[in-house]
Image: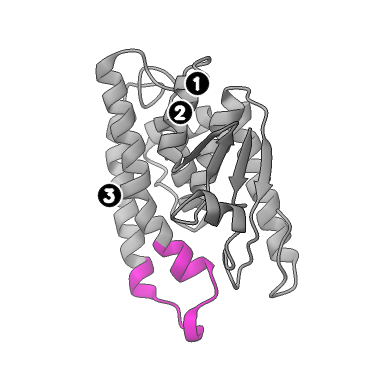
Amino acid sequence: MKLYSGPLSLFTAKVRIALHEKGLPYEKISVPWSLEHRYEPHHPDVVALNPKAQVPVLVDGDVVVYDSTQIFEYLEEQYPDPPLYPHSVVERVRCRRLEAAADEILFPPIWSLIDAGFYPARAGIRDHERIGAAHAALAKEYALLEKELTGRVWLCERFSVADVATLVMVRAASGLGGAPRSEYSALHEWLERSLARPAIRREMDEMNAFLATLRAAPAGREIPA
């Protein structure tokens, strides 16, 4: 099994956590990335395997799967133990809804923080209006997550892909200055439980180590992933 992976790709991080949670060995193929040039030029294998030329791309024998949600579903069907989806139909629907919300609702303001605050500013000018709007959007979503988590250990009936996807996004936002407010006790307790899981701790440690290397590197240098 091979995984084409971006060093700071949040969607690849989701897949790496799922693979480790399921105890599946795989070869990680890191695509070229730099702060100045991002993912350009795209890795030729990724271009050939994925029409969108994006990571993650999972290759399992003759099977090629891209898009983190589709990879989650493939892994669950092909390697069902331990499960990362709930058993009941109602909870599986909830799980898919919350995983989609992480990707489609939480990620856009995080991307604004990345594009307008993390990457070098275009023409040396930061888009503070865009950054402010991103913080406001995240605050709204954190309030909803607090309600989703109140009275629950995990987002669904068991630890699931909904927790993986949401954790990756909340941690990324927190690292970009958009952490949830301290009074959201259910959300913070869930974060602590999630970070105690070895697969998640491993992923967060690796991403933090990469960021530390990035900060120490001369400008313009491509960082090995």
Residue at position x 73%, y 57% in the image: 224
- Tell me if 27 is positioned left or right of 130 in this view: right
- Residue sticking out furthest to the front: 62
The colour mode here is: one colour
Label 3–label 2 contact, CB within 8 A: no
Q: CA distance from mark 1 to mark 3?
A: 37 Å
Q: Is residue 91 above or below residue 165?
A: above
- Residue sticking out furthest to the left: 90
Q: Which of 60 and 141 lies nearest the eye of the viewer? A: 60
Mark 3 crowdedness (10 Å alpha carbons): few <14, some 14-19, many ≥20: few
Q: Nearer the viewer, mark 3 or mark 2?
A: 2
Q: CA distance from mark 2 to mark 1?
A: 6 Å
Percent x, y of residue 122: 48, 81
Label annotation for residue 74: 2
Is 130 within the magenta?
A: yes
As helix, strand or loop, the secondary structure at mark 3 comes to: helix
As helix, strand or loop, the secondary structure at mark 1 comes to: helix
Is residue 196 visible in the rendered image? The answer is no
Question: Dot 1 corresponds to which residue?
Answer: 78
Label 2–label 1 contact, CB within 8 A: yes
Label annotation for residue 218: none
Amino acid type at mark 1: Gln
Q: Earlier in the sequence, mark 3 or mark 2?
A: 2
Is 64 within the magenta?
A: no
